[in-house]
Image (spheres, coloured by chain):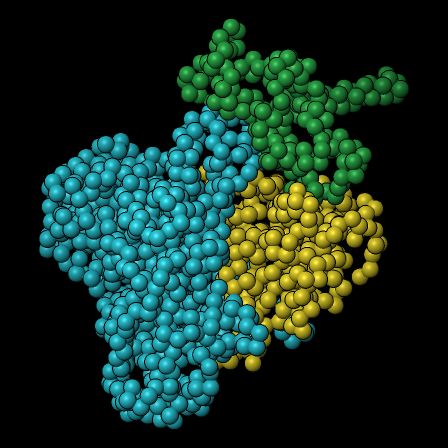
Amino acid sequence: MSGRTIGIILGLGAGCLAMGIGLFYSLSSADLAVQDRQPVPFSHRLHAGTLEIACQFCHRHAKYSPVAGVPSLALCQTCHQSLPQTTPGMKVLQTYWEQKRAIPWIRLQRLPDHVYFTHEMHLFAGLTCTSCHGNVARMTGTPRAPTYEMGWCLTCHEQRGASHDCWTCHK
Amino acid sequence: MSRDPQTPQGYSKTADSPYKWEMVVDLDRCTGCEACVIACHAENNIRISGEEEAAQGRAINWIRIERYWEGEYPDVKVKFLPVLCQHCDEAPCEPVCPVYASYHTPDGLNAQVYNRCIGVRYCGNNCPYVARQFNWFDPHWDEPLAEQLNPDVSVRSGGVMEKCTFCVQRIRTGKENAAKEGRRVKDGEITPACVQSCPTSALIFGDRNDPKSRVARLKKSERGFHLLEHLGTHPSVTYLRRLAE
Amino acid sequence: MDLHRRTLFKILGLTAAGSALPGCERDVHNLVPYLLPDEDIVPGVANWYATTCQGCEAGCGMMVRVMEGRAKKIEGNPRHPVNEGKLCARGQAALQHLYNPDRLQVPLRREGRRGEGRFRPIPWEEGIAEWVKQLRMETGAAAMIARPMTGTLTSLFATVLDALSGRLLLYESTGEQTLRTAHLRSFGTPVLPHYDLAHADYLLSFGTPFLEHWLSPVSFGVAYGKFRQDRLMVRGRFIQVEPRLSLTAANADRWIPVRPGTEGLLALGIGHVLVKEGLTRLSSSQLADFQPSFSSVSLEHISTTTEVSQETITQLAHEVSSATAPLFMGGGPAAAQTNGTETLTLINALNVLMGVIDRRGGVQWREPRHSPLDIAHPDLTNEHELMDLAQEFEQGSRTLLHLYSANPRFTLPPSLKFERVFERAKFIVSFSPFLDESTMMADLILPDHDPLESWGDRIQMDTLPIPAWSLSQPVVRPLYDTRPIGDVWLEAAHRLGGSLSKRLPWTSFHDMLQSKWERMIGDREDSSPTFESRWKEALRQGGRWSMETHPRQISVTAPSKEYEPPEFLGNSTEYPFYCYPYPSLSLHDGRGANLPWLQELPNPLTTGMWGSWIEINPATAQALGIHAGDLVRVTSDYGTIEAHAIFFPGLHPELLAIPIGQGHQAYGRYAKGRGINPLTLLGPTFDRHSGTLASGATRVRIERVKGQSQLVMLDPKNHPISHHIQETGGL
């Protein structure tokens, strides 16, 4: 085997390895594997799109907390208790309510422990939910988290003249 | 000690911040009671090292009370000295970091970015105050002690250098609250955990850019001095001498 | 607020782990929202709840930071009159009490021999039924040893035990019983006054460790800061007299070492100079009562005995007389002798001579204008009464022992033979949250909630400028299948039935507490109309302290004319050293030893942590061939201990000092098998008047022994700052 062939094989091998690592990394960071297995088949397209419910009606902590929050089951029930149970999803919801169990939603939007992020200040700065989360009103399934990588954050910070001091976002 | 006035990222040290954080330690008030030490541990998720690691000098304290004996019986005196990161304006730990994990914030804080740190420990070796401490091991809390951990502060893993941040999480919250109301941070609005707990109010924290702040006034006291002043580190911690007979 | 809090607990009970917890291995993939919305709870935003610290007798107000149902941080309550927003190391470490891995989680019943430490979990019903059965069987023979407490819970205990002809003993080894006895003799009241340090300009303290653990250390810390630096033209001057330079003495302008037990004599000498030179601030008629106590003494004799020069004594008297607001305090080692009460009455007399009673910067007693309540404020027990109790158990007139957060098997010297109680008791029930040395001997354990999970209150009349009624409220949902001790006692009372059941009609301790408070704050002229809103306001604030007060009536009595010298156990030839076991700054009487934060807190004077040591004067050690770090053995007629020798420059050459707190044989993984308990050395000798153990009155000897000794220290001697200090000549 010539040195050239060995070089090619080694090069291909290294490339595959890099791709594998990259895929592994993206899988773990974006929760692709679990994204559609929510305990209740909830549709943002229906709620935010068709019904035009404002984001912060359900994610009501966003304006005054670092965390946007997931609605309590009681909040779901304010509408759903007066609706007929026409879909299997609605029946699942009703079961949770009757059993007085909270819905264990799968977390899709995650940031590492070394990042400090607050919804409150981003809304205060005039951003809208769609700026980061995309147009969820058009998404049927629970929307996949975009890759919240530092470069992505910094681009926006730079454009808007926000701080890019490390300790603004790292804790 | 002189160095490039620009930090590696190209920010000038005084750029775009109206604040410059400063701490004053009044040694005439400090009693050495160590309330600050526990306050710091609770606030900043500082690991419990245990006897074995502590025996190897690997216990971590962001603030410690040093004590010095003077004289012999019966003319003995003890002096206490709380030592924490001095947040030097000319910090010796910053230029030696190969990955810019140690840098200066626009507020004048000496910062450590844990996710950048690769653990070469140059910064720790270069700090004359022994304020930086290295995590030789991953931290561990016997369950359920970890329930107490503060979500506003990262848990540092093994191989990472850590140090006092002046409770940057509290500074951040204070600045956010001020920003929401469209004002400057008020004097006394932000208190790091050690300052908050100190029974005798020996620790005072504030913005030295605000001429009316307590720290700005106190640091001009004739009792004032800096630790290892001759090294030219220009610390942001001013000590006030204890009055003696 | 109450309603919300309860719903919160219900909700949290129904939900699993909340949003992201920190920690590298704690990625939480599930996002569990609350079932019902609660306007008090916003994920990611902290709530602060006011409650009261139970770490010691001081009763500081606390604010607990709670996020998503977990307690994260404890700070002082800025509105509380005791601590004004500040808190000591031990108070802040209460979080590790709550989240301690060694907490008792379920009721337990003994298996195997008593003290073997084998227990079996049982249901609550079985536990309560068994206890009630014992109460019925052993009528008139019950006794309860509990930590010092006041308030509604104490009333409950007292009511139940009264009905059963039982005894309630509130015990703490650092309970300052000697001081109360001295105040009763000097001023006609056992209530401890407010020492107004913040406004004094000269403090002469005889041993009081007021910056460490004496009475109300945080309150004194706050006052000390003001005493030193808060006034424009005045910086208070502070002299500490004691044989060992404590942390408090380290802060004094001058430390005056004296021979152990002679503090009262020095006070007598100073009083003598004041009287002789006409420097007192009493009218001649008032002075007439005091003159006899101070006139017939010889300064020369005092100087030889105390080892304080005549010039110093005279100088101190002159400094006192030139001060505007002098203040005298006595306690700690000065009270730990057989003449403790005598010593303290002489120090009290100095306060009288200088006319500082009920003055600004002096010694003040305030009491509420309207006596508020029928809530119990029982006296504390001393070691002598505990020995009486042991006698009763030996004779069989007491058979049923109850324990609640008191650990006499650790805090009493073995020479008092209190062990008899644990051997003779027919049945032992413990309500303690940890398996400490005493609870280890229990037949039945019905563990209480943590204080941060409990309702409670506290009535403070001692040492405060104004009386305070503080409230405790649950700040987190109970972690385990424990029950509030108040609920358990009410349940037992109902099962016992009869008049007791009628006197305690409440179904829960919370209801009992609320009804007591309803009487207390219900009839006040107040802007808020309903009790409910006042109750909420009290909970928000942490209690109630804005009440009208007036000075308490006191009657001043002069000290006895005959000075009582101290007496020591053991002769000075065989046992050439005095020995003083002192409560540790971090571990107190040993109760802090199970908290890793406190174990890892370096002692400010020796920098030792995670262990025990024996302090020795360096010159003495040199003469005995002892080196720093040697393993040494200290022996008395009553016991022996071995530990690491530390050179302690601020120590009387004939004194050995040893911190109390380590040497646990139980009490969880952080405490067990670590260091030594110096109380082992002490003999049964008591203060003559108060019956308190004279913990400094047993003589010992010391020798070097072969073997390794290790103590973890955070010694700064290699730190560059020490070179800086050498170069620049100090701080």
Q: Is residue C610 above or below residue C614?
A: above
Res A127 seen here:
yes
**Figure chain in cyan:** C
For residue B113, which quarter of the picture?
top right
Query: In this orientation, which residue lies closer to the viewer: C523 or C615?
Result: C523
Q: Is residue B21 above or below residue C316?
A: above
- Quarter that holds the N terminus of chain C: top left
Query: In this orientation, which residue lies closer to the viewer: C662 or C365?
Result: C365
Q: Position of residue C196 (x, y in %)?
A: 42, 70
Tell me: A114 left or right of A13. Answer: left
Q: Residue at x 25, y 37 (%)?
A: C507
Q: Position of residue A13 (x, y in %)?
A: 78, 20
Q: Position of residue B151 (x, y in %)?
A: 57, 39
- Quarter that holds the C terminus of chain C: bottom right
**Figure chain in green:** A
Q: Residue at x 66, y 71 (%)?
A: B221
Q: Residue at x 38, y 68 (%)?
A: C194
Res B147 seen here:
no
Chain B shade: yellow
Q: Position of residue C82 (x, y in %)?
A: 42, 59
For residue C234, which quarter of the picture?
bottom right
Tell me: B218 left or right of C637. Answer: right
Q: Residue at x 75, y 50 (%)?
A: B17
